[in-house]
Amino acid sequence: MISRGLISRAGYICFAIALLGCGGDSFDKVRNLHSNNEAIVCLGDSLTEGVGASSGEDYPSVLSRELAFPVVNLGQRGDTTARALARLPDVLARNPRLVIVLLGGNDFLR
């Protein structure tokens, strides 16, 4: 059985590694850093699209209701990271304030 202390230490280590990965380059190359648009765009696969969820219960719709903020759902079932990367220009053309990416399951299955 794994102790809570070990899990806690592992969590701190993962957090520290993630924090170290955030340093380095300046933000000069971030295309939409100063976007005036208020929309959040959710890019992803069937989980983002809401396959299996009731109408209006996909996570982008719930997020929009909870934040009282516009959220655009660009989820497509079966999407892989390569296909989503190809759709990135369409996402950025919307000049989003924030993009939430949820991908990887279909890549793993293939």
Image (spheres, helix red, strand yellow):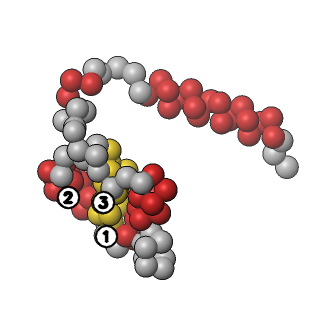
Q: Residue at x 20, y 28 (%)?
A: 29
The tally of labels here is 3
| Residue at the disc numbered 2 | 87
Residue 51 location, x and y as percent? Answer: 43, 76
Secondary structure under the numbered disc 3 in the rendered image: strand
Secondary structure under the numbered disc 1 in the rendered image: loop
Give 2 or 94, whichever is nearer the viewer.
Answer: 94
Q: Distance of mark 1 from mark 2, alpha carbons? A: 11 Å
Q: Is residue 58 above or below residue 94?
A: below
Could you classify mark 3 by the number of other residues whose Cα lies within 10 Å: few (under 14), some (14-19), or many (20 or more)? some
Could you classify mark 2 by the number of other residues whose Cα lies within 10 Å: few (under 14), some (14-19), or many (20 or more)? few
Residue type highlighted by circle 3: Val
Q: Distance of mark 1 from mark 3, alpha carbons? A: 12 Å
Residue 100 location, x and y as percent? Answer: 37, 50
| Residue at the disc numbered 3 | 72
Question: What is the quadrant of residue 7 in the picture?
Answer: top right
Disc with the residue nearer the chain's start (1 vs 2): 1
From the viewer's perspective, is 16 left or right of 61? right
Q: Residue at x 27, y 25 (%)?
A: 27
Q: Is residue 71 above or below residue 16?
A: below
Residue type highlighted by circle 1: Gln
Q: Does the rendering let one see residue 67?
A: yes
Q: Are marks 1 and 2 in contact (CB under 8 Å)?
A: yes
Q: What is the number of the mark on residue 76?
A: 1
From the viewer's perspective, is 36 left or right of 98? left
Could you classify mark 1 by the number of other residues whose Cα lies within 10 Å: few (under 14), some (14-19), or many (20 or more)? some
Residue type highlighted by circle 2: Arg
Secondary structure under the numbered disc 2 in the rendered image: helix
Question: What is the quadrant of residue 3 in the picture?
Answer: top right
Image quadrant holding the C terminus, namely bottom left
Disc with the residue nearer the chain's start (2 vs 3): 3
Q: Residue at x 29, y 21 (%)?
A: 25
